[in-house]
Image (tube, coloured by chain):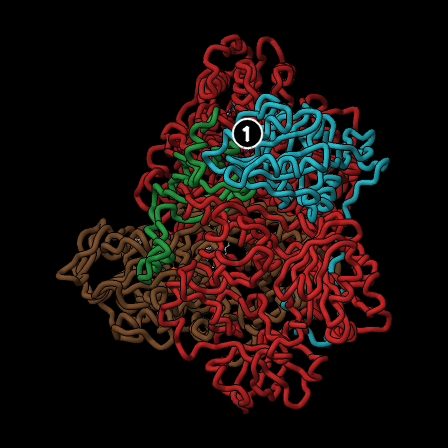
Chain colours: A red, B cyan, C green, D brown
Amino acid sequence: MSGYRLPQGGSHLDRSRPLAFRFDGEPMQGFAGDTLASALLASGRVLVGRSFKYHRPRGVMGAGPEEANALVELRDGARQEPNTRATMTELYGGLEAASQNRWPSLSFDMMAVNDLLSPLFSAGFYYKTFMGTGQATWHFCERFIRKAAGLGRATHLADPDRYEKTNAFCDVLVVGAGPAGLMAARAATAAGLRVILADENARAGGRLFEDGVHLDGLAPAEWIDGALREIEAGGGRILPRTSVYGYFDGNVLGAVERVADHKRKPAPFEPRQRHWTIHARHVVLATGAIERPLVFSGNDAPGVMLASAGLAHATRYGVAVGASVVVFANNDGGARTAIQLADLGVSIKAVVDPRREIDPALAAALGARGIRLETGAVVAATRGRKALAGIDIRGFDPISGALGANVMQPGCDALLVSGGWTPSVHLASQAGSAPVFDAALQSFVPGAAREAWTAAGACAGTLDLAGCLAAGLEAGRTAANACGKTAENRDISLPALSGQLAGAELPFPLFDVPATGGAKRFVDFQHDVTADDVDLANREGFRSVEHLKRYTTLGMAADQGKTSNVNAIALMARARGLTAPQVGTTRFRMPWTAVTIGALAGRETGHHFAPVRRTPLHDWHVAKGAEMMTAGLWMRPRAYIGPGETLRDAYIREATAVRQRVGIVDVSTLGKIDVQGPDAGEFLNRLYTGGFAKLPVGKARYGVMLREDGIMFDDGTAWRLAPNRFLVTTTTANAGAVLAHMEHYLEVVWPELRVHVTSVTDRFAGMAVAGPQARKVLQAALGEGDVSTEACPHMGIVRGRIAGAPVMIARLSFSGELAYEVYCDWPAGLAVWETLIEAGKPNGIMPYGMEALGTLRIEKGHITGAEMDGRTTLADVGLGGMASRKKPYVGSTMTQRPAFVDPERPVLVGLVSRDGQAIRAGSHLTLPGGGASLGHVTAVTWSPALGANIALAFLSRGRDRHGEVLEAAFPLKDERVAVTVADPCFYDPDGSRMHV
Amino acid sequence: MSDVSNEQPRTEPQTTVARPVVGRLVPGEAAGAEPPALTLRELSTGALLEVGAWPNHLEKVTKTLSDLAGTTLPGRPGRFTESPSALVCWIAFGRFIYLGAAAEDTARVDGALEAEDAAVVDLAGARRIVRIEGEAASEVLNKAVAIDFDPAAFPAGALAQSVIHQIPAVILRRSETVFDVLAPSSLADALIDWMTDAALEFGYRVGEPGAVL
Amino acid sequence: MRIHCPCCGPRGVAEFSYGGDGTVRRPDLSVTDTDAHVAYVFERENPRGRHVELWHHIGGCRHWLLVTRDTLTHEITRVEMAGRFAGEAARMPGAGA
Amino acid sequence: MQKYSAFSLLRNALSGHRDWQPAWRKPDPKPAYDAIIVGGGGHGLSTAYYLAKEHGLTNIAVLEKGWLGSGNIGRNTTIVRSNYMLPGNNRFYEWSMKLWEGLSLDLNYNVMFSQRGILNLAHTPSQLDDYARRGNSMRLEGIDAELLGREEVARRVPGLDMSPDARFPVLGGLLQPRAGTARHDAVAWGYARAADARGVDIIENCEVTGFLREGGRIVGVETTRGEIRAPKVGVAVAGSTSQVLRLAGIERLPIESHVLQAFVSEPVKPILDCVVTFGAGHLYISQSDKGGLVFGGDIDKYNSYAQRGNLPVVEHVMSEVSVMLPFVSRLRLLRNWGGIMDMSMDGSPIIATGPLPGLYLNAGWCYGGFKATPASGWCFAWTMAKDEPHPLNAPFTLDRFQRGYVLDERGAGPYPKMH
Ligand SMILES: Cc1cc2nc3c(=O)[nH]c(=O)nc-3n(C[C@H](O)[C@H](O)[C@H](O)COP(=O)(O)OP(=O)(O)OC[C@H]3O[C@@H](n4cnc5c(N)ncnc54)[C@H](O)[C@@H]3O)c2cc1C
Ligand SMILES: NC(=O)c1ccc[n+]([C@@H]2O[C@H](COP(=O)([O-])OP(=O)(O)OC[C@H]3O[C@@H](n4cnc5c(N)ncnc54)[C@H](O)[C@@H]3O)[C@@H](O)[C@H]2O)c1
Ligand SMILES: Cc1cc2nc3c(=O)[nH]c(=O)nc-3n(C[C@H](O)[C@H](O)[C@H](O)COP(=O)(O)O)c2cc1C
Ligand SMILES: [Zn+2]
């Protein structure tokens, strides 16, 4: 027999609510309040998992976040969660858990052969072998290594649960609701501060349940509930099941609340977890301490457990972790644990302590309970593979560290171990303070605070309860002072303690027991790193604590070395003849305990990854069969695909309509910026390469802006609406960047300019009406206004009304046809659009999408983002003439640099396929027959107007090569197309079609 | 414009590209937890314009705006004040958003301010306004916005420009439990989509559309 | 990391867009010496420690700020308006609060 | 050098692993060397190795201020690829790839170079065109590349959200089959061990605090372990370039230091075979041999020397990874860390002589220098030995910014945060 449920007790347990669950398919029972670990232990389960490398059988070793062994696959299907700590899993009815990292079964695991081969698998063995003849050997071997590693199995199924996120603000965040945290939160609340108290457990109280005391005459549970009520009544917010995992700059902390993990699945609309970003003026770190195991031969046998875990399982869950228990500790906590357990009805065989003597009061108390005390002795080995069967107790010389004679070899099924306590300095350390060594604790405590925090209780190295309570109170007051509440926090007092056992927690500096009998001595349980591995690392020169970690993987497992790091440091220090602080710790990093990735993503996933930006015509497009495509956040119609049509048919039809009759396209996505003020003209003059100061009111002009390095940034038009007012359009992609660019110059570079810029992208819906019939259609649609050549010449602007809505019309052309851009109020967009279409019906108006738009612009050799790709100059794209010589502008000087005037620069050319074969975008140009790349193809189309496959491309010395025959090579598909180099403007080069 | 005109008829099967997520408020509809703790509704305004004052003309501009709105301006950015006919938001140094009950307010404000003092940009139709109302309203907003909505820090009359789900928004606290959110029109559906989803755990119902003033 | 915007109050860093070293000065437009522009555009001191830098409150008031921040600790010791409203900001009631 | 092999491992296993020698010696610095490399990261160590191996220069030292590999070599997401678009870049990185393919044998150290392929997902037609341009560029230079359609992508990476109505649907991707990952620490240790075996002194905990000058020339360095003289001093200190060159009086460089965060999940059984990048954002992910999903995204986008980042980037990266691979949402983040990147103004590196006589500079690797480790050292060794660049690194000059010959792979312009 091994663990079992005690007839009574268990502060967390509700014995009236039994819960059924299954482990590895086997039906079992626990009670409400249990963790999966306590329920397994109560059911007599010893073996619960397999270790990472050697697939060693393992049992439960802890009772909280420190758990390194009892990892399970929880739930199934899409909710399967590998590597879940059984000690942090609250039991719920119907829970399904499975052991992991074993095949075919937990008790018979083929991979345990690794354990037999373990002499080969020393630290870093893989760096020395598997090289064979090179890559092939490694690839072959790697597959097996990968399969053997990895612990639990994940699923490819999408996570079905919701995760929420929130921001919270408080004066004081208290992390940890143990005695120190509770006192701190009480004090801060009493001072009138806004307090958040977070603890990762379902129940507050920390280790207070295990102290065996009464506070102000109350049992721990009652006192804790009182404290919580008081904090809540004072306006404090209590967050149970909430791990504060990260401490970021400016006192911003990240926490994850496990809202529904204690249920089978979340209720409708309930998130599984909630991420909290907590902004605190001051933080109290009351995160407690974690008990250290001792390093001795066979110390990983299932049944070997931390002493505090053995005690916690009894006090909280009424579980005796064994029928016959031995305690092995280097501090008084061992004896005390034994006494408390005995009083709870657990059968304790012996206490083994390396010290020559212990506190006499404790010794007497042990004697009174018939518990054998072996001082000057250690546990040197264990027996039993899948379950602890017994131990070897040997004499020990505390001065030399040598083993002495055999003392006894008792049988036992549980061994509780304590090597002292390791304060949880993680958050303090994340916040930027290096932990400092405390010789009395033989461990590290938080260093000087860099952010606004105070550490209190076991986290700061205070181990006794009275000290923790006092430190918590003091920390609460410090926090109150830091928040400017100096007077208000007097009326909280410390509870009177009764029933406490004597004894000091300070450990005798024993970390490991010399090896006996060849069994491994584990330092890092989860990653199977042994004391020998530490020695090997030292021998091979991996002596820095960070090298030790990386070479042996010590501390890199899912538990991040919570129970192993300090022991490893001590062992390395001894091997190198240094002190522990000289060796130092590895760097602490977030998260404190592993947190669900979904919780950090929140609802910003799936469709909510990014908002959808829509024009007012969106629904119309969709209703008319448009295939929509993303353009940044926007959705735009690609083509309106009619019945029986392909995308290609559709865009050819649309583009042909524009060339022959008239088309209409939604251009609402273009960036629009209102540029206003007495210096607006001067401002644009400085930003654009061309001149704008003298642009007449009522006229628009095409313009290009450069970046400061002289490369093209964006193009668009500026419409002068009044002497001090322009409407500037930008490309869809760069709308935000251009606005920020303008704001930068106005606020930082030329603050003297009186110009105000505002995005009016969402102010105006825009539609371009293009084609030989455009004027006719527009005039027919206009209720008011005149677009005759006289009233609205090329680049002219007029106002009018369509469908009752005021419109602004500029005669601009991207397609090369007679064309107008019509802007109206955003909400009026649909009415104006439909009116235009109605008016155009007699002329066969056709809405067109991005594909047709692209075809039309390629035929004209107009540039877009594919050509303005952040590497090209005005001259490259043939717009050198737009570079004003009369005035400087942003980027102008930088275009004088050698690379800008290099004659080898690729420049924009047109290409025509010679044999009717389509050219592919992304092709490279080579000489016929191949060779090096001379340039690349940016855009291609079948041109309905030319009846040819054409393309735009950048070609080195391209302007001298018009008429030359080259190849457009697409080696990705083994294709090459013979092309003739041409002028990039294929269609209507003199622009006569727009000037009608 | 489109960089994609180069598409050849594809050899691979064509995908249907993302349909948008629709976010529309249909009055009377309810969703999420029962009973609904929140009400969402869309608000309209007669005029909506932005005023940008030149640095040393601020006093004159604030005075003009106060007179036009019939209320005293709040005194610093981050606050708004209202009268029955207008609501004036001081959104940044030298910048205001003027919400007028009447559409004609646009012309009135424009006419009252000289080009030498300030720029006036008509933003009518460029923003939509969503009201979220209920005890949990600030909790919904705090899912996205890292602003302390404690009434002491952010009382009624306070405003914030911030970002909700990548959407630039102006948040006005009209009362302890009522917030009005201005969002660019092209993203207003997306805001509603986000907000209704965020409100599910509290439950919401959609109220009749109303007016800001 | 939070930046205390003189206009909007303390806000998360995600609302801001970084504008780089705030001490480099753009040469006047009339300067045609490329070296001066090359220095402005490409060359940075990149200190380890105190750094005066530009941030654009793009998700808030859209003002540009001059922030003094330690590049090693990320501690922010000073935030000012970079632009033309610097004077205005200083005169505002509750400025800097 | 003790030879590593399956046999030596077996022999040592039988003798309790007691006979293994230190991977590299821990010598004290000599007063003078023929050349000094500042920086014991991947690039510094590989430079020393190739100086010894290819140029016969063995009286050299590598000076490292901390423990070997404490910089970016020890904290990167280990992606190795040569899928660049611009000729100057792809030739260089392909040379690196070739060196990678023989590296374990060359060093007699298994650096676990795992050629499991890298797949760049495309979400818009224009992105597919960009990838085609890049892939064709590669193929014309003799580099492997394949353009994949939706079905092939879905087949290769189970678990991807391939729904046609995803917010940013996957339309296809560019695959480089020979790309992959390598065990980052092993690369540092393997080079150190191999360089040491050729006589190179690798000196840890030796910080360069100044430069020795004679006339205008650099003739050595001051360190926390005393003065060390050498006629040639190569600087390969990655994120510390500005700080170290300031010691030589160079006040300004086309470099900003930024923090890049990276992440690893709890280990799980094999679930992701190739390296995948998300095209509708910035995310790259692979699974380590240990089982952790190793992933990263954008830099934090502000100057930093802190090796730690902030929450918004963390949240954004998690959001991207759960969008691309919705199952990852269920897994847990195990650890996060940061490294300091020397972001150059065009996103491309600098391997050059200068900026002072006697000084040589290797810098500007942004987040891409791990894959460059072999070729960077190889080219830098050449440059130091011959006092002129090899044709492969000829484009990576320091004066390219002045002359305008930038290598801007992304077209992002002179904004380090954008590269
Ligand atoms: C999170 C992250 C992810 C990355 N992912 C990838 C990736 O997937 N693929 C890829 O190709 N690249 C990646 N990189 C980039 C890559 O890691 C670096 O470009 C590369 O490692 C830099 O070269 P290095 O190894 O020589 O640098 P480092 O390892 O940083 O070496 C520089 C060394 O110089 C030392 N030093 C500094 N100052 C002094 C001094 N005064 N005296 C003596 N020594 C000094 C430092 O201590 C350091 O050890 C990533 C980087 C990071 C941070
Ligand atoms: N008997 C012994 O041998 C012994 C030794 C040491 C400590 N103790 C006892 O331990 C207690 C110490 O009190 P205390 O208040 O300092 O610590 P505590 O351990 O009682 O409480 C700390 C609490 O913080 C939680 N926590 C830790 N990190 C967290 C995080 N990042 N996020 C959320 N929650 C987190 C823990 O789960 C725990 O509930 C006292 O009761 C003391 O008597 C006893
Ligand atoms: C490819 C890769 C894989 C890693 N895997 C793990 C891991 O499994 N467990 C772990 O604790 N850390 C892992 N790390 C992170 C390291 O522990 C460490 O955080 C990182 O090297 C940076 O060092 P620092 O945190 O000491 O600054 C990994 C790092 C890299 C680069
Ligand atoms: Zn602001």
Task: Indicate the secondary structure of the residue bearing disc 1.
Answer: helix
Is A562 located above or below residue A712 in the figure? above
Front position in the image: A123 or A380: A123
A489 relative position to A275: left or right: left
Q: Quadrant of ligand 1?
A: bottom left
- Left-right relation of A683 to B202: left
In the rendered image, the residue lying farthest to the front is A790
Q: Which quadrant would the N terminus of chain A be assigned to in this image?
A: top right
Quadrant occupied by the C terminus of chain A: bottom right
Crowding at dot 1, Cα within 10 Å, few <14 / some 14-19 / many 20+, comes out as many
The location of residue B43, given as percent across then percent down, is 75, 35
Mark 1: amino acid: Thr
Residue D215 in the image: x percent, y percent? 13, 61
Q: Position of residue A589 (x, y in %)?
A: 48, 42
Q: Nearer the viewer, residue A110 or D280?
A: D280
Image position of C5 with respect to A701: above or below:
above
Whether residue A63 is visible here, answered yes or no, is no
Which residue bears the numbered disc 1?
Answer: B62
Q: Position of residue A140 (x, y in %)?
A: 57, 71
Residue D65 in sight: yes
- Read off the chain for label 1: B
- Quadrant of residue D109 within the rendered picture: bottom left
Q: Quadrant of residue A396?
A: top left
D8 in relation to A757, above or below:
below
Give me the residue at 23% from left, 55% from top.
D248
